[in-house]
Image (cartoon, coloured by chain):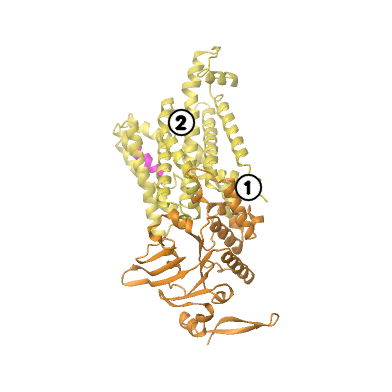
Chain colours: A yellow, B orange
């Protein structure tokens, strides 16, 4: 009897990858300018190989400057938040935490807003957001550690406390912000939108994202043992302090790059890891891949809905909550056996 | 093989948790650590596993100082079998077993065919291979314990530290567990286990250590030291060690009975 048979992990990942790719291409069709899938593929390919242009120049701009960055950002942000959520959940042995519940998103949001009203550059905004994101997760963990012996509920409560602290600090920033320019842009950004995403946003987000994802992927087997508890991981020979540092820094960095592009987007980081576990099992070395693909596809679908609704640009965070809450309730009913 | 000498531990220097603990463990040994609740048995295991840092004393394996070994090196010499609990996520049994291979994996690498073969072999030996795809959280206490032993086996350390391997098990599973422990010792493992059943010292162990208030009250062969006098003192409760006749085998075995007066 082979204990590895009947696994199909690779097949599932290939299928998920194909689905995400199909969704990626189909997403170019959503919007005011009607266009055929053939033309979309040709426009993208024409960037790399020589294809005689048979389409309007406007379409070049629409596809390459407007829709492409938005679609790519949706996949990257969704994937980043989901891997970040999966890592936090495994690190804290807690299926109910995510970047937004732990207060990381709010901390990063506060840091970014603080930098923005001081007219900081993109890199400064990222750095300040990263520092406050780290402060938030360390604060939540410390509160839970000292007052509740690290139980699931106490960590969530600590996260809620930290999160509301930073949300009130964000409100203070808003009252200080100049009402003509800064306030509207901060408010709109915080509600979450991919609408203003540009290709340079993608390029600026990529280094931090690739760095964090690679670190988490390299340490995936070590992170996986944390699900058995820190003490047991140590007895299995894992350098737990190093692995914890890797998880906290990488997950926070990913959350920060997501937050600085499109504000605080909730629910994705909480529910996607659970969907990933249903698809390919609880093993972290698998859900790190599955979460990225499912998260990317999930946020892309939500953004497609936003783009598909004519006349009004719904905030991303509102729609993820609208879709996320019923999905979460469904997941609760399905997987409650595994949680205590 | 393993030598513990003068080990002591405290949270507060006024109140020692472990005082001058010394014992050794040879290969094929099964050492049973007995003692009342709160006497420092778990703390001793934690000190040996480097989860708590001992305040003085030494732990040596084949003459090498364990306190100077890296976490990875220590894990290659000593594996831990904790008491079975719930996992936060729906892991399959084989995935829990595979965790034990983590130190042997190359940086960034995935488990190889050989890693899976070892997991398979360990589960086969413990009779849980047919459950390899069952969810760990849905398994019974005895089955979970076997999965955790398999995980320790694939770690390929020669010393197994077991925290109450027979706790929360019914008679049939207790016996099954003791048989597994005995067969592991025959394969060359050295086993240090804690227990609340002094009978188990007679059934499976060749060494017993009686621990009370953080010091070792007595140690030696179970036949010599697990007796009415020592157990009564150990648990501060009258315990009678007597002999029972197994009619169907026509042989005498020692049993321990707590007495209520």
Q: Nearer the viewer, residue B218 or B87?
A: B218
Residues drawn in magenta: A103-112
- Identify whether A100 is placed above or below B60: above
**Which residue corresponds to mark 2?**
A194
Q: Residue furthest bottom?
A: B261
**Are both tags, 1 and 2, on one chain?**
yes
Q: Is residue B142 magenta?
A: no
Q: Nearer the viewer, residue B92 or A125?
A: B92
Q: Calculate the distance from the C-alpha at mark 1 to the C-alpha at mark 2.
A: 41 Å
Instruction: Return the x and y of residue B117 as percentages of the image width and height.
Output: 61, 50
Which residue is found at the position 63% from the left and 47% from the top?
Answer: A4
Packing grade of label 2 (10 A; few <14, some 14-19, many >=20) is many
Q: Earlier in the sequence, mark 1 or mark 2?
A: 1
Name the disc covering residue A4, or none: 1
Give the structural element (helix, strand or loop) at label 1: loop
User: How many marks are shown on the rendered structure?
Assistant: 2
- What is the quadrant of residue A184 in the picture? top left
Tell me which chain the residue with mark 1 is part of: A
Instruction: Return the x and y of residue A14 as percentages of the image width and height.
Output: 60, 35
Which residue is found at the position 59% from the left and 29% from the top?
Answer: A22
Left or right, A93 with reference to A176:
right
């Amino acid at each position: 009897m082979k204990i590895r048979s009947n696994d199909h992990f690779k097949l599932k990942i290939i299928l998920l990858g194909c689905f995400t790719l199909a969704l990626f291409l189909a997403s170019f069709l959503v919007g005011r300018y009607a266009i055929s899938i053939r033309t979309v593929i040709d426009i993208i390919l024409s960037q790399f190989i020589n294809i005689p242009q048979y389409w309007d120049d406007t379409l070049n701009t629409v596809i390459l400057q407007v829709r492409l960055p938005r679609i790519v950002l949706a996949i990257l942000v969704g994937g980043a938040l989901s891997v970040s959520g999966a890592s936090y959940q495994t690190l804290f042995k807690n299926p109910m935490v995510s970047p937004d519940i732990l207060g990381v998103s709010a901390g990063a949001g506060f840091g970014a807003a603080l930098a923005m009203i001081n007219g900081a550059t993109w890199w400064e905004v990222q750095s300040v957001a990263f520092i406050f994101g780290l402060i938030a997760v360390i604060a939540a963990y410390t509160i839970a550690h000292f007052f509740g012996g690290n139980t699931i509920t106490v960590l969530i409560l600590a996260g809620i406390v930290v999160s509301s602290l930073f949300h009130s600090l964000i409100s203070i920033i808003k009252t200080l912000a100049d009402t003509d320019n800064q306030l509207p842009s901060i408010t709109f950004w915080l509600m979450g939108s991919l609408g203003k995403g540009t290709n340079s946003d993608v390029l600026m987000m990529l280094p931090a994202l690739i760095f964090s994802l690679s670190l988490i992927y390299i340490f995936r087997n070590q992170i996986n043992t944390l699900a058995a508890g820190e003490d047991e991981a140590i007895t299995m020979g894992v350098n737990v302090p190093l692995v914890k540092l890797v998880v906290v820094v990488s997950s926070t960095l990913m959350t920060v790059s997501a937050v600085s592009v499109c504000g605080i987007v909730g629910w994705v980081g909480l529910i996607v890891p659970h969907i990933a576990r249903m698809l390919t099992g609880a093993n972290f070395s698998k859900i790190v891949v599955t979460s990225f693909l499912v998260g990317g596809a999930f946020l892309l679908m939500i953004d497609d809905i936003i783009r598909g609704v004519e006349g009004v640009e719904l905030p991303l965070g509102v729609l993820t909550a609208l879709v996320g809450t019923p999905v979460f309730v469904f997941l609760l009913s399905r997987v409650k056996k595994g949680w205590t | 093989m393993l030598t513990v000498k003068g080990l002591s531990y405290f949270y507060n220097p006024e109140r020692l948790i472990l005082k001058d603990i010394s014992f050794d463990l040879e290969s094929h040994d099964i050492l049973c650590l007995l003692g009342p609740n709160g006497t420092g048995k778990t703390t001793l295991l934690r000190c040996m596993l480097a989860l708590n840092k001992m305040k003085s004393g030494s732990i040596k394996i084949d003459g090498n100082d364990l306190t100077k070994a890296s976490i990875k090196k220590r894990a290659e010499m000593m594996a831990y079998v904790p008491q079975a609990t719930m996992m936060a996520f729906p892991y399959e049994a084989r995935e829990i077993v595979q965790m034990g291979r983590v130190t042997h994996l190359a940086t960034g690498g995935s488990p190889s065919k050989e890693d899976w073969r070892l997991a398979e072999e360990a589960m086969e030996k413990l009779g849980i291979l047919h459950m390899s795809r069952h969810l760990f959280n849905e398994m019974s206490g005895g089955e979970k314990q076997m999965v955790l032993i398999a995980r320790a086996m694939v770690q390929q350390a020669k010393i197994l530290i077991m925290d109450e391997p027979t706790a929360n098990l019914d008679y049939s599973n207790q016996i099954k567990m003791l048989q597994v422990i005995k067969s592991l010792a025959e394969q060359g493992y050295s086993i240090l286990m804690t227990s609340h059943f002094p009978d188990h010292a007679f059934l499976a162990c060749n060494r017993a250590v009686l621990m009370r208030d953080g010091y070792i009250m007595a140690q030696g062969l179970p036949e010599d030291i697990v007796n009415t006098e020592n157990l009564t003192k150990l648990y501060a409760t009258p315990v009678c060690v007597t002999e029972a006749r197994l009619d169907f085998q026509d042989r005498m075995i020692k049993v321990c009975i707590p007495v209520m007066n």
